[in-house]
Amino acid sequence: MNHIINKKRLGQELTREELSKSFGGYVDGNIPDYQMSALLMAICLNGMTEREILDLTDLFIQSGEQLDLSIIEGIKVDKHSTGGVGDKTTMVIGPLVASCGVSFIKMSGRGLGHTGGTIDKLESIPDFRADLTPEEMIDQVQKIHLAIADQTADLVPMDKKIYALRSVTGTVESIPLIAVSVMSKKIAGGADKILLDVKFGEGAFMKTKEEAEELAELMKKIGDHYHKEVRTLITDMNTPLGNSIGNSLEVVEAIRILKNEEHNVLTELCIELASNIVSMGKELSLAQARKEVETVLQDGSAYQKFLEFVKAQHGDLARLEISTKKQNIVAHKAGILKAIDAFKMGELSVMLGAGRKTKEDSIDPKVGIMIKKQLNDEIQVGDTLCTLYLGDQEPPEGIEEYFEIE
């Protein structure tokens, strides 16, 4: 293993056999965390060639089972976001597209670094079952067009183990590793077409638009290799997405959007993403698809679909809890709100207990942050900028400085 680490440390190309020996050996338990961490860091620093990326993607896919969704009628479209702070789009998009008659079957992840995971958010709903078997997922989609579940142990197990290690070793922000992780799951997941929401900015793994475009292009190349249509959207994550950060709080916000009670940048992004999925799934123009999406949002069909989905996976929304221990963060200066630091807000949510610092950490679903002001709002001294929903952890000083007021 040492020679493989040294080879990549020097920026040299690894063979498929070397990739198999190192990544496969780690999954089998023959290679310790510290050696795999060293290899991941070498990849993070030196990158990978296109051949290495395709080989590693294939090794990830071949490490477990692959879903066969052919029994489900129609075109199956999967969606993935590269992650961001307050990104609760899947909880909104799923019911929107399912209400339009497009089958949406998705395996989602848990929190990674400063960004939250869809499964963590859904599991804040008491009794919600995320551990569906492939057979249960397919059966549910045939009945209600919608299932969102945790990545099964048998589907891309190599990614699941590497994903957990990356989150705690500073190796999340690697374009090749992100591309391999995302696309191996999407290919193994069996969808016909894939929509990728590739984020850039302070709250995303890709800090610049150029990096996001590079990642999007790489994932499209992987899709082409497996003869899958891949559509990408490059979206901004310099500011937290929506008004809430934290698991139960984000479920509440998703519900408000689906009930047509909240209209913000997040609402518009959800409509845009859902419209692209319906366009791909029903082979409609984007304008026609958007009209269908807006109709099911306005007539309540999407919200009813969300309730149907939660019930199908045994969740009890009536018992959803949010912490009653609150603290307001107020402005110390007047002016116009120019920016909210998404990265620092994401880190703060982890510090409060809404995310993981290590892969063994548990999450407190009741804690989080509710943002009270939007960009370009006029701020007076003493105005509440955000409200913290606290658990056992005490917040740090200086949170008001995360809000740039001029």
Image (cartoon, rainbow, N blue to C red):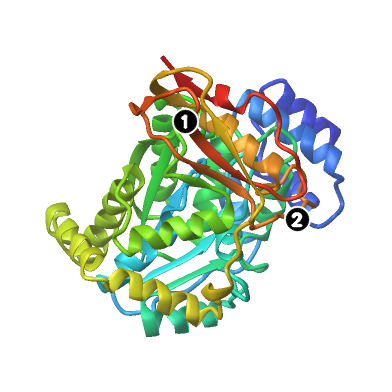
- Mark 1 vs mark 2: in front: 1
Nearer-the-camera pick, 163 or 263 = 263
Q: Is residue 289 above or below residue 200?
A: below
Residue 243: give x, y in percent of width and height: 44, 44
Nearer-the-camera pick, 274 or 350 = 350
How packed mark 1 is, by other alpha carbons closer than 10 Å (few <14, some 14-19, many 20 or more), is some
How packed mark 2 is, by other alpha carbons closer than 10 Å (few <14, some 14-19, many 20 or more), is few
Q: CA distance from mark 1 to mark 2?
A: 33 Å
Q: Amino acid at mark 2?
A: Ser
Left or right, 215 with respect to 247, comes to left
Say whether disc 1 or disc 2 marks the residue closer to the N-terminus: 2
Left or right, 313 with respect to 265, comes to right
Q: Which mark is residue 362?
A: 2
Left or right, 352 with respect to 204, comes to right
Residue 87: give x, y in percent of width and height: 47, 47
Which image quadrant is residue 92 in?
bottom left
Residue in view at x 52 percent, y 73 percent: 317
Q: Which mark is residue 383?
A: 1
Residue 294: give x, y in percent of width and height: 20, 60
